[in-house]
Image (tube, rainbow, N blue to C red):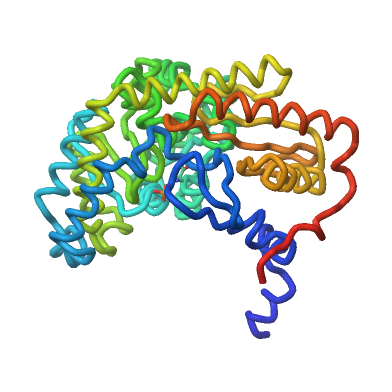
């Protein structure tokens, strides 16, 4: 059979919605300068959907650093993978500075967080090793696990009692195979903003012998006194053996990094296939990241203002009776009850009649009957933006209660071919 026939019939769990959703709910085009106000379908919207937490994406100094580096080096330099011909002093400088910030001996750049995490897991663990991981882990962790030919045990999200049980099983198995144990979790769970239970997990090191890998994609730059992440926030950074974050969020760029003891980083640099067999990060991204890091470190007011907005938004929503889950980070979920039809009608109403743009998550990503609207506050939002948004959400929640969104009206949404 022709493989292409199969994909005509089965377009995949998300692809099945393309006809109804493309260009509106999925693949929407946000135009204009990155920030709280962008253009969607020709109209200005108040935008709560970007992880530009500390406002670096469009900061004039960042834009200048990016442009100057692009003018000086172009986008091609350096050619080749780091190991072969893609090494520069700027790559090394960025690694040293990032590692210092997160309190580790050494760091290494990753071209994308996704590939980097897959490769960290792949290179660290062989068939004798056992991986114990949180059930709500990001796809990059899950896909790293798919490469792991040894055993893995999952613990239900943030369930420390169950983690102990899995560690008990892992310990027994590792004794037999002669392998080691790695626990993988996240600092901030990006979908609903709750924090990994790092203090409790680290405490288990007294009883069990394992190494801890933390994906802190949403935590770096937002959490902790200096923005060094969720480990810093909880005071357990030293106990994180492999710290990972991406430049896709607070650092507002592309790329990622991993930080650990020097011998671990040396090992990763010589063994991560996603880096050995892929071209080095381009110079404007590296020099641009140095500028972003410098600002992240020297302008705490960016993070302070972010938290002012986060606290006002989360407090305001809770006061109005909204369920925002267990968020302990800037990620602010608004959890409502309803199906896909209600969810799409709500988002349509928010975008068209309230000029509010946020992301929506429905089944099968979250349980049936649940709607999750995700708000990402940034340092560039204002308290007025917060007020307007809470008012809009309050009206929308009332309409949902009154059954106004229950009729399917997707036909009124113009989607692109
Ligand atoms: N881990 C988490 C928790 C993420 O949210 C993301 C998405 N940015 C990644 C890893 C992958 O990072 P990147 O976008 O740099 O590939």
Q: Quadrant of the C terminus?
A: bottom right
Where residue 174 sits in the image (x, y, percent)? 43, 36
Of the pair 189 and 251, the residue shown nearer to us: 251
Tell whether 322 sits left or right of 175: right
Q: Quadrant of ligand 1?
A: top left
* Most foreground residue, 181 or 198: 198
414 relative position to 328: left or right: right
Taking 167 as reference, is 24 left or right? right
Which residue is pictured at 67% across the width and 30% down the height?
334
Q: Quadrant of the N terminus?
A: bottom right
Q: Is residue 164 visible?
A: no
Residue at 52% of width from left, 23% of height from top? 383
Q: Residue furthest left?
A: 89
> Going by the picture, which residue comes out furthest to the bottom?
1
At x 15%, y 64%, the residue is: 84
Residue 252 point in image, percent of width and height: 36, 43
Q: Is residue 215 left or right of residue 393?
A: left
Q: Is residue 261 above or below residue 286?
A: above
Residue 124 screen position, x and y as percent: 33, 45
């Amino acid at each position: 059979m022709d493989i292409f026939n199969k994909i005509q019939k089965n377009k995949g769990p998300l692809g099945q919605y393309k006809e109804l959703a493309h260009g509106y709910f999925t693949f929407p085009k946000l135009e204009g300068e990155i920030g709280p106000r962008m253009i969607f379908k020709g109209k200005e919207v108040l935008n709560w959907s970007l992880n530009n937490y500390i406002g670096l994406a469009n900061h004039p100094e960042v834009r200048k650093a990016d442009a100057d580096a692009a003018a000086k080096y172009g986008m091609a330099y350096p050619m080749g993978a780091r190991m072969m011909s893609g090494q520069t002093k700027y790559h090394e400088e960025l690694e040293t500075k990032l590692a210092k910030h997160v309190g580790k001996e050494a760091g290494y750049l990753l071209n994308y967080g996704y590939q980097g995490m897959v490769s960290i897991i792949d290179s660290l663990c062989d068939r004798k090793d056992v991986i114990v991981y949180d059930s709500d882990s990001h796809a990059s962790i899950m896909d790293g696990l798919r490469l792991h030919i040894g055993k893995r045990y999952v613990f239900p999200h943030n369930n420390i009692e169950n983690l102990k049980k899995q560690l008990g099983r892992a310990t027994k198995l590792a004794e037999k195979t002669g392998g080691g144990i790695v626990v993988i979790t996240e600092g901030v769970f990006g979908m609903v903003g709750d924090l990994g239970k790092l203090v409790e997990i680290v405490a288990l090191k007294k009883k069990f012998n394992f190494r801890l890998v933390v994906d802190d994609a949403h935590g770096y730059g937002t959490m902790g006194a200096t923005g060094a992440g969720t480990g810093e926030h909880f005071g357990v950074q030293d106990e994180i053996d492999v710290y990972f974050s991406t430049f896709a969020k607070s650092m507002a760029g592309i790329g990622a990094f991993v930080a650990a003891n020097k011998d671990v980083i040396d090992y990763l640099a010589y063994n991560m296939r996603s880096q050995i067999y892929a071209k080095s990060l381009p110079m404007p991204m590296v020099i641009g990241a140095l500028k972003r890091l410098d600002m992240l470190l020297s302008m705490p007011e960016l993070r302070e203002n972010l938290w002012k907005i986060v606290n006002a938004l989360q407090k305001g929503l809770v006061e109005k009776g909204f369920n925002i889950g267990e968020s302990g980070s800037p990620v602010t979920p608004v959890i409502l009850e309803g199906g896909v039809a209600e969810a799409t009608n709500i988002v349509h109403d928010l975008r068209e009649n309230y000029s509010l743009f946020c992301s929506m998550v429905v089944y099968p990503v979250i349980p049936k009957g649940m709607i999750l609207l995700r708000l990402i506050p940034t340092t560039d939002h204002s308290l007025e933006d917060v007020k307007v948004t809470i008012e809009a959400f309050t009206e929308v929640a009332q309409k949902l209660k009154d059954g106004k969104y229950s009729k399917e009206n997707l036909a009124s949404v113009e989607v692109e071919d």
